[in-house]
Image: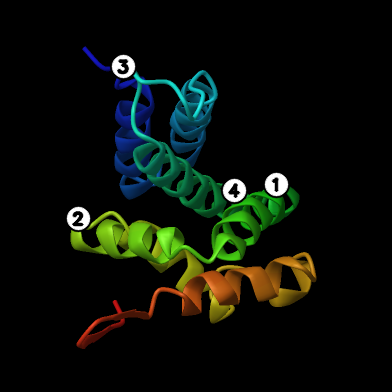
Amino acid sequence: MEDRRAEKSCEQACESLKRQDYEMALKHCTEALLSLGQYSMADCTGPCPLEIESIKIESLLYRIASFLQLKNYGQADEDCRHVLGEGLAKGDGAFQAVLCCMQLKGKLQPVSSILQGFKGGVLEPRDFLSPSLVPSLELCFLSRCLCVPGLLFCP
């Protein structure tokens, strides 16, 4: 039977984020990311590489939202660089596909709400954000508008 610890931890992180339990969300995200670290991309018994990438992106997005709520902007900035820098640089559409799946499953709303608050300056004045974090957040927020063949999708 496949090891589902990473997937389960990611699901628990989403639920914790919905409950606004940001410390617990961080704990679950970290567990998910550590669990993913045990798999090599050639591992036949573990999750497939696409599933690993999906869980990694989801976990990082939940971590970003949690770190922002906990005012840990440096760590949020670092995670933004990982999820955006690596995800978008690949150019394979995986990042956008994960966002679309998260939206369809109702998992993007907690992250989106937090990012909207920061983008609009509701949760914290922009002066307190790392200069590199602001563009990263805006890019993450804007990339939620997905172009799916025959459909423009903006949650």
CB atoms of marks 1 and 4 within 8 Å:
yes
**Residue shown at the point (53%, 23%) measured from the top left:** 34
- Mark 4 or 3: in front is 3
Q: Amino acid at mark 1?
A: Gln
Q: Amino acid at mark 4?
A: Phe
Q: Amino acid at mark 3?
A: Asp
Q: Position of residue 147 (x, y in %)?
A: 33, 82
The residue pinned by badge 4 equals: 67
Of residues 134 and 5, which is closer to you in this image? 5
**Which one is earlier in the sequence, the residue at label 3 or at label 1?**
3
Its colouring scheme is rainbow
Of residues 68 and 75, which is closer to you in this image? 75
Instruction: Find the distance from the CA under tag 3 to the CA under tag 2.
Output: 22 Å
Of residues 39 and 68, which is closer to you in this image? 39
The residue at the far top in this view is 1
Instruction: Find the distance from the CA under tag 4 to the CA under tag 3.
Output: 27 Å
Q: Position of residue 35 (x, y in %)?
A: 47, 21
Q: Position of residue 44 (x, y in %)?
A: 36, 20
Instruction: Find the distance from the CA under tag 2 to the CA under tag 1.
Output: 27 Å
**Residue shown at the point (68%, 73%) measured from the top left:** 134
The residue pinned by badge 1 equals: 75
- Mark 2 or 1: in front is 2
Q: Residues within 10 Å of mark 3 (few under 14, many from 20)?
A: few
**Which one is earlier in the sequence, the residue at label 2 or at label 1?**
1
